[in-house]
Amino acid sequence: MKGRRWMRAGLTLLLVMIAWATLCGVGAAQEKPQLAWYGYVKLDASWDEGLINAGNYARWVVSEDVVGKHSHFNMTARQTRLGFTVATKSGNAAVTARWESDFYGGAGAASENRNALQVRHAHVDVVWPSGWSILAGQASDVVSPLAPATLNYIVAWWGGNTGYRRPQLRVTRRIKMGEGKEFRVEGAATRTIGDEFVAADPGDTGADSGHPSFQGLMGVTAPVSGRSMGLGVYGHAGEEDLNRELGGDPVKLSSSSLGMYLTLPMGAKATLNGEAWAGTNMDDYLGGIAQGIRVSGTSADQVAARGGWAELALRSASGTQVNFGYSVDDPDDDDLAKGARALNRALWANVTRDAGGGLRYGVELSNWETRYVEMASGKSWRVQTSVQYSF
């Protein structure tokens, strides 16, 4: 009930913010739209000591009770990315549309040399000089605004980092508080993406809830050592509805989280980044090691989890970047069945170098451990290399 009240209050606040922002007005277009393409071509190659799910990228290590330890090698160009922006003016507002994709839309070994397109971003953003802005379309979540700089495609998702991309209507208010200082408030009504328990059901458990989820964030930026420090809190509230999919009465399950983030400059060339969070039913936000709901017969319950990540980033004037990071995702064991993933943690170090002309290459070494309920853990070292040309 508390989650529902929080969600209703958040949606009401979002509607008020939208109404206030639109008072700024959007007039007729005054400039010819400007089209700009961007993207990169990227090849990744990786070697794993043990069986890593899902191969091309690391989510977790399979239990050695399921598959004995043996090495794997993968190579892919799926992360190759293509996008464009279209920018114009409408009245006194700056209007920008963005579309972006990569090639992780297909799955399985049969797709490795004929990759499927995946839409990452597809949204329009209207920004007024007053500090108000409205975004409509598919974009990154408001929650968990940071991400570690890993060569691994999934940036510690399912291993301590949360947040993904989904359709949303977002309102942002930025308030300047002096030179380099800003207070930011964001709220979004988002598509509730749940699970499909019955193939014949036309909707998933998120659509069956009958309403969107709400995401919110409050943060500040301020100058530190001549650079920008960021600190804030975020959270979300939603609901999934299992409408007799399990053969019993309808089951309503909440999904919620609270978290905080920090970007802290440490001198001219080093930055400490990190996030910490706790929540329930977090699988659709890539938390709980992809475990959000525990089904038992005709009933179900939420899985609680907590986690976070921290990374020290070092930059040099020559274009070399070095990152050291750690992440952990820890579901509540009391909410898990035998064989479920009980903890997932990763430790990594990587170095990338700018070779000039848009060419960049790098190598990453990471150590993974995934623990299971009443099963042997999975452990693995992973070595990944990449070559990337950006345009």
Image: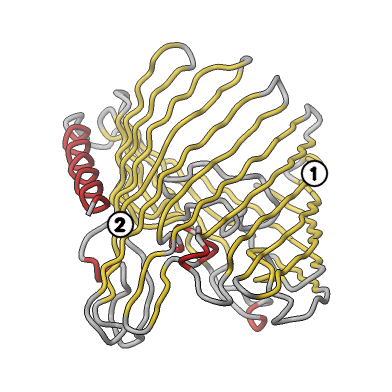
Label disc, if present, on residue 238 of the rendered structure: 2
Secondary structure category for the residue under label 2: strand
**x then y, percent, for residue 21:** 22, 33
Viewer can see residue 27: no
Q: Amino acid at mark 1?
A: Val
Q: Amino acid at mark 2?
A: Gly
**Looking at the image, which residue is at 81% across and 66% down?**
47
Label disc, if present, on residue 385 of the rendered structure: none
Viewer can see residue 261: yes
Task: Determine crowd level at label 1: few under 14, some 14-19, many 20+ residues with C-alpha closer than 10 A.
Answer: many
Q: Quadrant of residue 330?
A: bottom right
Against 299, residue 334 (above or below) is above
**Looking at the image, which residue is at 51% across and 52% down?**
306
Against 194, residue 133 (above or below) is above
**Looking at the image, which residue is at 74% across and 41% down?**
324
Viewer-nearest residue: 68 or 92: 68
In the displayed structure, does residue 1 sit left or right of residue 300? left
Q: Which residue is mark 1?
A: 351
What is the number of callouts on the image? 2
